[in-house]
Image: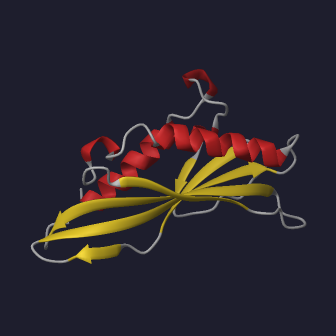
């Protein structure tokens, strides 16, 4: 597995641990998608997480490249719950708690290579079935030339 795949998998695993039984506010970890947005049906959970991977930024390229990988964790909450905006804020708090257990993602990044960017909330569009918020992360890691 490439370093990039390991990083994405580690983030997905940490998010999958989010449950009320594990001490979080929500059960948002029940559904964690990568690279896709959900469509909510009547039997779907109230909260869903989705990870999107933005364009990486090579800082140095040589035999050992240093890469910054932007990951965005999207919190999506059904709009028909009571106080959906506040429910989305609870999911945001759970995301931060799950991801930010260390600064090197269990040794997958360069030292202190995990950093948080902005947290954004979106206004619910008329007719939208969910309320959304997102937490941005920047993950700095190294990969060898030709051996990602």
Picture residue at 38% right of the left edge, 50% below the top = 9
Picture residue at 54% right of the left edge, 43% below the top = 96
Work out which residue is located at the far left of the displayed protein and give it: 63
Viewer-nearest residue: 105 or 27? 105
Q: Quadrant of residue 83?
A: top right
Viewer-nearest residue: 86 or 2? 86
**Placement of 100 over or under 56, stated as above or below:** above
Picture residue at 38% right of the left edge, 65% below the top = 69
Is 54 left, or right, of 26 in this rendering? left
Picture residue at 18% right of the left edge, 77% below the top = 61
Residue 147, image x and y in percent? Answer: 14, 67
Q: Which quarter shows the C terminus?
A: bottom left
Looking at the picture, the colour scheme in use is secondary structure
The image shows a total of numbered marks equal to 0
**Placement of 27 over or under 1, stated as above or below:** above
Is 42 left, or right, of 89 in this rendering? right
Q: Which quarter shows the N terminus?
A: bottom left
Is 16 left, or right, of 45 in this rendering? left
């Amino acid at each position: 597995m490439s370093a990039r795949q390991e990083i994405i998998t580690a983030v997905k695993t940490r998010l999958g641990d989010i449950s009320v039984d594990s001490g979080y506010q929500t059960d948002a970890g029940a559904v964690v998608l990568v690279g896709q947005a959900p469509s909510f049906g009547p039997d779907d959970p109230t909260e869903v997480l989705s990870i999107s991977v933005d364009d990486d930024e090579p800082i140095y390229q040589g035999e050992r490249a240093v890469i910054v990988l932007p990951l965005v964790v999207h919190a999506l909450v059904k709009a028909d719950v009571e106080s959906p905006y506040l429910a989305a804020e609870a999911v945001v708090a759970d995301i931060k708690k799950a991801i930010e257990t260390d600064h090197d993602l269990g040794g997958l990044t360069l030292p202190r290579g995990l950093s948080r960017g902005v947290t954004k909330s979106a206004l619910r569009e008329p007719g939208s079935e969910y309320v959304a918020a997102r937490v941005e992360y920047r993950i700095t890691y190294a990969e060898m030339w030709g051996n990602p």
